[in-house]
Image: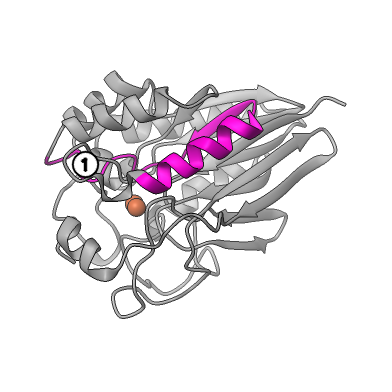
Amino acid sequence: MNTFTLIQITDTHLSRERPEFSGNFEIASKLIGKVKPDVVVHTGDIAVEATARSDDLLFGKEAMDSLDAPYYAIPGNHDVGDNPSDHGYMPPKPVTDALVQTYEDHFGPDHWVIDQAGWRLIGLNAQLFSSGLAREQQQLDWLVETLASADARPVAVFCHKPLLRDAIHEPVDVPYRYVPLVNRGPLVAAMDAADVRLFACGHVHQARDHWRGNTRHVWCPATAFTLPDDVQPRVGDKRCGLVSYRFSPRGVEVDMQFPAAMHHPEADVLRKVYAI
Ligand SMILES: [Fe+2]
Ligand SMILES: [Fe+2]
């Protein structure tokens, strides 16, 4: 049968200068080398903090290039800066055109489409939402066209941030955690024109697998670390890992994996790297 295997990794938070999380990446890399998927998708936060230290992005690229599989990537807030969000939230390090351009110089386009095994797989730059950059509208126009031309094919969307916590319209939980409420309407309208069966994200550093309507929402566990409950409320499963997918014309199998060898850095390590 026509199948396509994909491993999603996310939130590797890599840096030559802050190598605290490189060990877990090596474990993911070995697993990828064993499985040899058709493709790896990195759903962002490749770097510890590329907005402050551009070498983090280069180091992340060197790490991704070392994988024994072709890969696609999309940016996270630690790669290109964060987007403004609900209730006037302004991030301390906002996304800029220059940061996205630098990211694209390393990893190629910040949004992309792959057609395989009867599916259309779409990668989106979540950091553009509510940014007001010209790229934001260009990406939305591209998405509308790319979803409309999917015809009867099922679609999987990969995006750094989750679309929602529990519902499209819901009270604001943490403004920087999800796709902003104001952007969900146009996004959902575009997705409703197609058969979107999977919405796969990273960013939260918690694993979760839940359904809304016909769409399965998969929160990929972070490679690098989880956050203590006093810093971040628990919504899903706080373990490090990755997700393996097998796409076929009959559907998609989802296998969330938590390699026992991945270690969970203590809070004082996170405080050193991120001053949380
Ligand atoms: Fe992250
Ligand atoms: Fe993130």
Q: Is residue 1 above or below residue 185?
A: above
Q: Is residue 90 visible?
A: no
User: Residue at (67%, 53%) from the top-left corner?
Assistant: 215
Amino acid under disc 1: Val
Q: Position of residue 232 (x, y in %)?
A: 34, 73
User: Residue at (64%, 63%) from the top-left corner?
Assistant: 210
Q: Is 50 a magenta residue?
A: yes
Q: Position of residue 174 (x, y in %)?
A: 33, 69
Q: Residues within 10 Å of mark 1 (few under 14, many from 20)?
A: many
Outermost residue, front side:
261
Q: Is residue 266 visible?
A: yes
User: Residue at (30%, 22%) from the top-left corner?
Assistant: 106
Direction from residue 75 to residue 185 in the image, left or right? right
Q: Nearer the viewer, residue 190 or 12?
A: 12
Q: Nearer the viewer, residue 231 or 197?
A: 231
Name the residue tied to disc 1: 95
Query: Quarter-wise, where is residue 271 in the image?
Result: bottom left
Q: Position of residue 16 (x, y in %)?
A: 21, 36
Tag 1's secondary structure? loop
